[in-house]
Image (cartoon, rainbow, N blue to C red):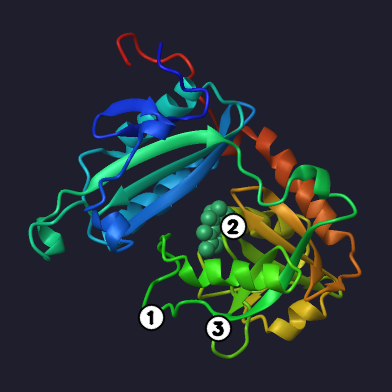
Amino acid sequence: MTDYAAGAAYMDGAYMPVAECRIPVLDWGFLRSDATYDVAHTWQGRFFRLDEHLDRFERNIARLRYSIPYDRDAIEEILHGCVARADLQDAFVEMLVTRGIPQGRDPRTATNRFAVFAVPFVWILRPERHDDDGLNVIISSIERIRAQAVDPTVKNYHWLDLVRGLFEAYERGGETAVLIDSRGNVLEGPGFNLFVIRDGVAATPAAGVLEGVTRQTAIELLERRGVRLELRDVHADELRGADEAVATSTAGGVMPIASVDGRRLPGGEIGPRLLADYWAAHADDVWATPVRYTQPAGAR
Ligand SMILES: Cc1ncc(COP(=O)(O)O)c(C=O)c1O
């Protein structure tokens, strides 16, 4: 019996334990960060907003001129196949495409590689820290890679700015960072979008960020509650002076921000309500796709 306890993966036509799934060193996905990916999650045995993740993934594959021999149904089947093999109820499910290995230096000659893996759910902030606590963020001095160079709406592995932000955060007594643009507006952090709340009004950066599925969910949930929401530039001083702020990510959902640059935010009602609404939304059948745990006979 194959041991999928730590997670299951699919690559080059076969399922395997996640630890055995390896990208060859010559693949441009590794050598050039020439790749796109998406991360969905399952919660209590159901995918959350899977269509939105698949829409974004397929759009980004096209934008970066990859082509893979899997249609949407086939991709979906493999996502189910990995979660089923890993036997996970709450899973972090990543799908990715790399350029592959070109002949010479012409990326058009490469056969693109497709892979999927499912591992236990990942938390940027563990739920036991949701009440009376939250993320301690710093506003980084590092600018996010410019959108004109690497389009942040195409989910990508160009993370050196974000990783530098993390190290800056550790040095300054924080645990994660929010990166800025050249005009001092906050954008996003390593794996999350940002909402700033002041005097009952929520704001989130309109552009220059990944259009996160959790961000979109938060937008819809805030609108349902009748909270005024602004999509616009958000200056770093607004985050420093916020009543409340939250980070949003598939890896952890809606996460309260406790402090910014060492100053504790006063707190309020909107963030905790959004957090509760986010997890309650997982019971909504419209956004849920049950995992097909019973795999077809003969599937490895
Ligand atoms: C840079 C960046 N911003 C935002 C997000 C949040 O996106 P989502 O809510 O779709 O997980 C991610 C997720 O990994 C990310 O990498």
| Front residue (pair 37, 174) | 174
Q: In front: mark 1 or mark 2?
A: 1
Give the amino acid at mark 1: Gln
Give the amino acid at mark 2: Gln
Question: How many numbered callouts?
Answer: 3
User: How far, Cα to Cα, is label 1 from label 2?
Assistant: 23 Å
In the image, the residue with mark 3 has its CB under 8 Å from the nearest atom of ligand 1: no
| Front residue (pair 145, 148) | 145
Give the amino acid at mark 3: Asp
Q: Secondary structure at mark 2?
A: helix
Q: Which residue is mark 2?
A: 216
User: Which residue is pictured at 57% across the width and 62% down the height?
Assistant: 190
Q: Describe residue 245's horizontal placement relative to residue 284 as left or right.
A: right
| Front residue (pair 193, 169) | 169
**Vertical side of 290 occupied by 25: above or below:** below
Q: Describe residue 135's horizontal placement relative to residue 207 as left or right.
A: right
Residue reaching furthest to the front: 171
Q: Secondary structure at mark 3?
A: loop
Q: Which residue is mark 1?
A: 148
Residue 227 position in % (x across, y down) = 78, 64
Q: Residues within 10 Å of mark 1 (few under 14, many from 20)?
A: few
